[in-house]
Amino acid sequence: MRTSFLVPVYDTDPAVLRLCINSALKAADDRHEVVIVDDCSSGEETCAFLARCTETGLPNLKILRNPQNSGVSYSLNQAAAAAAGELLAPVDHDDVVVSQGFQQTLRCLRYYHAQWAYSDEIQVDANGFLIRRMFKPDYSPQLLRSIMYINHLQVFSREFFDSVGGYREGFEGSQDHDLALRMCEQLAPVHVEAVAYHWRILQSTQSRSGETISSHSVDHSKTALEQHFARLQLQAQCEPVLFRRHPDQAPEPIGVYRSRILPGQPLTVAVIIPCRLGTTQVVNNAKITLLNHCLQSLSRSLAEQDDQQLPRPAVEIVLVINHEDAVEDARETLTRYGLSGRVVQDEAGFNFSRKCNLGAREANEDILVFLNDDTEMQTTGWAAHVISLLQEDDIACVGGMLQNADRTVQSCGDNVGRNSAVHYAPNPNAADVGDAMHRYLADHETTSVSGAFLCCRRSTFLALDGFSPAFPNSFQDVDFCLRARTKGMRCIVSPHIRLLHFESATRDAEVDYETLSVIRSFHGPGLAGTDRYALWRYQPIHFSLWSYNGLKFRLFLMARVLVRAARRIEKAFTREPRCWRGVLRKSEFRVR
């Protein structure tokens, strides 16, 4: 199938436009085409370069010109109308297409008989030097609502593009996000694990000013999200997430959005806390009683509401105590912190899954929240966020960001595959964006949710038969989430819900090899070699210094330091835009 690259141009620096067009022509070869639409540029250098491109007479290069400046959406639609290819691939006028990655994208489209695919990409600065690598997850609907992660390179069929109405004028700066939201309502895209695009971050980039998101892009994305939920017949509240880059700077939009679906009817919440009365632990040099500390933070967080537009739900506490604990003591503890609820006593013999299931049977509320007693809730009004995130039927469970006692990140989702089973924490700093997908700011899908704070609908919990008693000490949360995923359901982590997790003082935190082998034998066919959401791409690697792998890793780090030093020197002496040698050489230029 023939592909048409769509390139809207407006007063582009000829140096970067030359790289863009030549990279697209290299990827197009003789089988595909490049369609350029000049949006009535006024710059003499840009017009002169486009005139030289026209004079080349290349049969697979079309150049059109708008009679007046009409915006990027109009220009892209004009390019699509003039294109002869069955597939369309939009390209920004200052970016670079990687031909090898493009070919891999086409292979995936053919293999899966897909109508829409997207690839990984690399962000580069004005002169083409690496800023960051963007390894994307497989299709992640919640993440797409939070951030336009699909971005470049996208390839979709003309028929599909026309069926959703093409690009909409009035969404300039966020036209790609708006189109992706409308397209994902029809079908899911295919993720191609290959770098097919270099995204150049310039001051002139419409959606960004350097690394600052332009105000019109924020407004347009917010409108696109609100209309997306309206088309799904859902009432939602959408707002940009503000990020403070420096303690002395004011928070500003960063291209991440928080969407909250408003529930159609009031729902009730049961917080199920398996515990042993009187358990103490030293936290930050202070001795605390775990259950008391947990209930105190719950009482405080439920008394306040950070978002007044979300309804405040009724919350009941269900304490599941050990068989040797006194029921009256547990009830008195609930009363002391102004919390209403019930107390149920477990039988002899420890089984954490059994305790959780016992609490779930006792609860009659709509939403079940499984909470460890060694936690401290940090977010006020968290219950309203949980209810909002559980409004869609295909969401199995919701979790939050777990932090250690020193407030470093412990978990923002779980990275589970055949070769790994670890908490996801790419950066210990909770005030950071986390990774290239901004997962410390964006609601996102994950393989599984930690059982220290796991929320689900009661109907979902019963449909999945609860936690399996086959996992008495650990991995019952992973097993639950994997069973949910086999039924086509999603597991969501919201970093906007944050709590401290001190790790259990009442059960062994070590995971034995038998448990690992059991979880892999049960879920082996459904587990990818690596996590499908690409969390492993950003997971830090830790080795013992004196191990064989540790020494190899240290040598790798030393080599990387030398390479980065050489790149810094090269960058200091580079004065014009460049392209990576493996992507495009000057000898491969077809227009100059």
Image: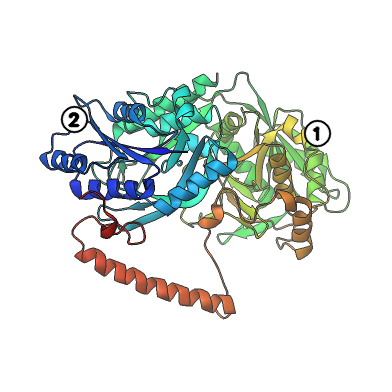
Q: Amino acid at mark 1?
A: Glu
Q: Which residue is mark 1?
A: 362
Q: Is residue 69 left or right of residue 187?
A: left
Q: Residue at coordinates 58% horizontally, 38% vertically from top-left? A: 113
Mark 2 vs mark 1, foreground winner is 2
Q: Amino acid at mark 2?
A: Cys
Q: In terms of image quadrants, where is residue 111?
A: top right
The residue nearer to you, when weighing 264 against 176, is 176
**Total count of labels:** 2
- Looking at the image, residue 587 lies above or below residue 93: below
Q: Which residue is mark 2?
A: 40
Label 2 residue SS: loop
Estimate the spatial distance between the alpha carbons at disc 2 and disc 1, rounded to whole Å: 69 Å
Label 1 residue SS: helix
Q: In terms of image quadrants, where is residue 359?
A: top right
Q: Residues within 10 Å of mark 1 (few under 14, many from 20)?
A: some
Percent across and percent down for residue 234 are 55, 21
Question: For residue 590, which numbered disc appears in the image?
Answer: none
- Looking at the image, residue 532 lies above or below residue 219: below
Percent across and percent down for residue 34 are 33, 40
Task: Name the outermost residue toward the left.
Answer: 44
